[in-house]
Image (cartoon, grey):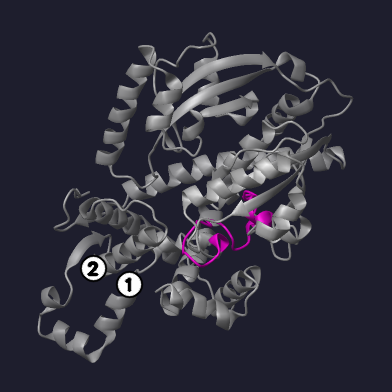
Amino acid sequence: MRAADGDANGRQQVKSGSHQSQDRQHTRGFLPAFDGVSVADMNMFRSITLAAGAFAAALFLSSPAGAQALSKGNVQLADSVVAVVNNDVITQRELEDRTGLITRRLQQQNAPVPPAAQLQRQVLDQMVLERIQLQKAKEDNITVDDATVKRTLERLAQQNQMTLDVYRARIEAQGVPWSTFTRDARTELTLSKLREKEVDSKVLVSDAEVANYVASQRGPNASQTSDLRLQHIMFKVPPDAPQADIDANQAKAEAVLKQAQAGDDFTKLAQANSQDTDAAKGGDLGFRTQSSLPAGIVTSVSTLRPGQVVPQLIRTTGGFEVIKLVERRSGQGTAADAPKLVQTHVRHILLRVSDGMSESAARQKLLDIKREVLAGGDFANFARTYSQDGSASQGGDLGWISPGETVPEFERTMNNLKDGDVSDPVRSEYGYHLIQVLGRREAEGSATEQLNIARQAIGQRKAEQAYSDWLRELRDTAYVQYKGVAGQQEQ
């Protein structure tokens, strides 16, 4: 998410992050978290999945009782080691703390809780990757001072229209110690600075890439470029997934690919198997410009006829994908004297899946609102009444949005709406959105400003790929030994 201090339109709920340091600030990595606390609260930290680290173990080992246990050689009784990560260890207590916290959060959100052994394996893998990154940050002399952490917490409280004291009470009411929450803020800020130094600052976007992007959006060659309508089935593979999980997901994907090639209904296969948010729609991505798709996908469908399935799995940064070409059409841009990008004027209503509202209840509420809007109701009034986004006071109006500025699920749906259309509920990491497009225009500003928009969108995609590759390399070069955890392998 883009840093959004003072953004009255509340775009932080849908805007995706530029990977330029001046734009990112301290808000990268926001993910949904606590019931009763705004999604944007904990988006900032991978906090629920990063939470509950060394806090309890550190307290014990620094106490007199802990020191006595160590001096007597009773470490195994005090706390056993479940993983060695280079010159550091992860203890059983740390693992149990974090697993317990994640379990409670999933239960509060009415989300399915994986079997205990599976969840513990996944959490430990995540803790290992976090520990490796923190070690790299220390090696790079990357630190975050107390003043920066405090400003971050104050910003989160302000975004939720609370004082810091009230915000703290709200967090602790969810069963999360404030010390843990604060520590996780520092961890996320540290990892963000590490990513900026090691990855984002090294991403380069060439002038040729920018020119091609602009041309595909609105330039003189737009009419010569085909837009592609695709369906996909996604099998997600986290960057830190162990090889056993990668192999298992690949096997599942291969089996579904065979079914699709044999003529099984692709829509039903996507609904039953895809792990992406568009699974309910049969994995339909709508029409996309070729520049907005990974190059590997564009190449793979280039020789297909509409209705055909790519004969092999596509490996993307997110995992394995089964792809079907549904339709081609001529590029919708028109020739212009100068490069132009299309901006969309959009508004939305956001319902977070929290505060006792289930997934089904959020969807149903937005469907009810959509029916009333289509019957003549005022979208803006509904947004002011129900939306849980900072844009509610403006009737949900997010203003003019350029390509690449929104989270993928939001932008994909927005791009497929005609002026005045209202979407069905759309799931993103922030909750469910009801989206209405108010109009489109060529981007204002100088040619330089428009080229900068294109450069930012391209840089974002390249940075995500580079970060995924960097994490994989960092993990491969670390010494990791698992001790007594089912399903884990020494490395």
Determine the CA span between mark 2 and mark 1.
8 Å
Residue at which label 2 appears: 91
Q: Mark 2 packing: few (<14 Cα in 10 Å), some, or many (20+)?
A: many
Residue at which label 1 appears: 54
| Percent of width and height locating residue 92 | 21, 67
Looking at the image, which residue sits at the far bottom?
64
The amino acid type, in three-letter code, at marker 1 is Ala
| Percent of width and height locating residue 233 | 43, 29
128 relative to 291 in the view: left or right: left
Total marks in image? 2
Name the quadrant of the N terminus. bottom right
305 relative to 131 in the view: left or right: right
Toward which corner of the image does residue 157 lie, by quadrant? bottom right
User: What element does badge 2 sit on?
Assistant: strand
Of 272 and 449, the residue lying toward us:
272
Residue stretch rendered in magenta on the structure: 11-40
Do the residues under discs 2 and 1 have CB atoms within 8 angstroms?
yes
Compared to 293, does 388 lie above or below?
below
Q: Mark 1 packing: few (<14 Cα in 10 Å), some, or many (20+)?
A: some
| Percent of width and height locating residue 206 | 67, 35
| Percent of width and height locating residue 347 | 73, 47
- Chief secondary structure of the magenta span? loop
The amino acid type, in three-letter code, at marker 2 is Thr
Q: Which label sits on residue 162?
A: none
For the point 73% across and 66% down, the residue is 6
For the point 38% across and 13% down, the residue is 261
Compared to 286, does 110 lie above or below?
below
For the point 82% across and 32% down, the residue is 340
Q: Earlier in the sequence, mark 2 or mark 1?
A: 1
Of 476 and 388, the residue lying toward us:
388
Of 434 and 483, the residue lying toward us:
434
Looking at the image, which residue sits at the far right?
337
